[in-house]
Amino acid sequence: MTTVLRANEVSVRFGGVHALAGVDLEVEEGQLVGLIGPNGAGKTTFVDAVTGFVSYTGRVELDGRELAGLSPHARARAGLSRTWQSTDLFDDLSVRENLAVAATRGDTAAVEEGLGMVELGWAAELMPGDLSQGQRKLVGVARAIAMRPRLLCLDEPAAGLDTSESEELGRRLRRLADGGASMLLIDHDMGLVLSICDQIFVLEFGKLIAAGPPDTVRRDPDVVTAYLGGAASELTQDDK
């Protein structure tokens, strides 16, 4: 199996704060990999490092190519695409135009592919303000897909969604992975992450405390302890 993303000993400091400490993580071709942890664990910092938005030490490779020294723009062109927690869209552009901005040289085929993969073709000519929060999140995912990335990093795509919207998002992300897309998913919705991911990595205070398939991670004592008082009950429940 081809390794799309390989991160070794990735560390990030903000002044005296060690936000990440020697994190190792891999995403294989066609895998949907989850990255979870309590608030402040370093999840978004890891994605910021991988995509070039913060300085780090360690090594990050995409398809075997080291990315050291590359700007966020260059990493995106190399095949690293991401979404943002805020899902900022251009509200004065249609949904299709939002995707066209991201597509390389206005690649119309990539735009239609992105819309199709999240089943939003029907909304192509609508304005973002005409959509629900869940649909706007999907536009953000489609915009990232329109870049035809080797790896799609999703930062809290289910934030602000109700239960049914989150479940629908999960089904669509799983279908994308089953179709060959490689993705790294960060989300606080433990039910979502545990039910759709192939592998899960768990951070606490910037350190990796567990990694493995969902059934292994949800029963790891260190993971349960990290989530006590938070989402521990979700970690110990079997998938529905």
Image (spheres, helix red, strand yellow):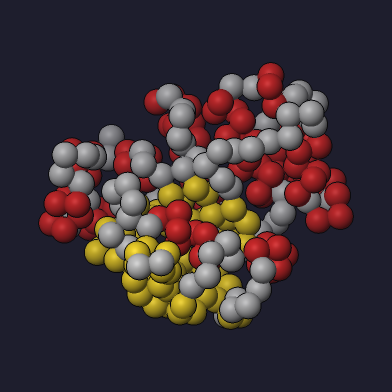
Residue 74 versus residue 168: which sits nearer the camera? 74
- Residue lying furthest top: 130
Q: Position of residue 176 (x, y in %)?
A: 56, 48
Name which residue lies at 52% across and 49% down: 154
Q: Position of residue 144 (x, y in %)?
A: 65, 49
Q: Position of residue 97 (x, y in %)?
A: 81, 37
Q: How many marks?
A: 0
Q: Is residue 32 left or right of residue 225?
A: right
Q: Relative to 138, say whether 165 is above or below.
A: above
Q: Is residue 88 left or right of residue 111?
A: left
Q: Relative to 90, say whether 210 is above or below.
A: below
Q: Position of residue 206 (x, y in %)?
A: 32, 63
Residue 28 versus residue 65: which sits nearer the camera? 65
Among the 4 quarters of the image, the one containing residue 188: top left
Name which residue lies at 76% across and 23% down: 126
Among the 4 quarters of the image, the one containing residue 8: bottom left
Quadrant of the frame with the C terminus: top left
Q: Relative to 113, say whether 159 is above or below.
A: above
Among the 4 quarters of the image, the one containing residue 123: top right
Name which residue lies at 43% across and 32% down: 167
Name which residue lies at 45% across and 79% down: 58
Residue 49 versus residue 224: which sits nearer the camera? 49
- Residue lying furthest front: 15
Q: Kindly tell me whether residue 110 is visible in this rendering.
A: no
Q: Is residue 135 left or right of residue 7?
A: right
Q: Kindly tell me whether residue 138 is visible in this rendering.
A: yes
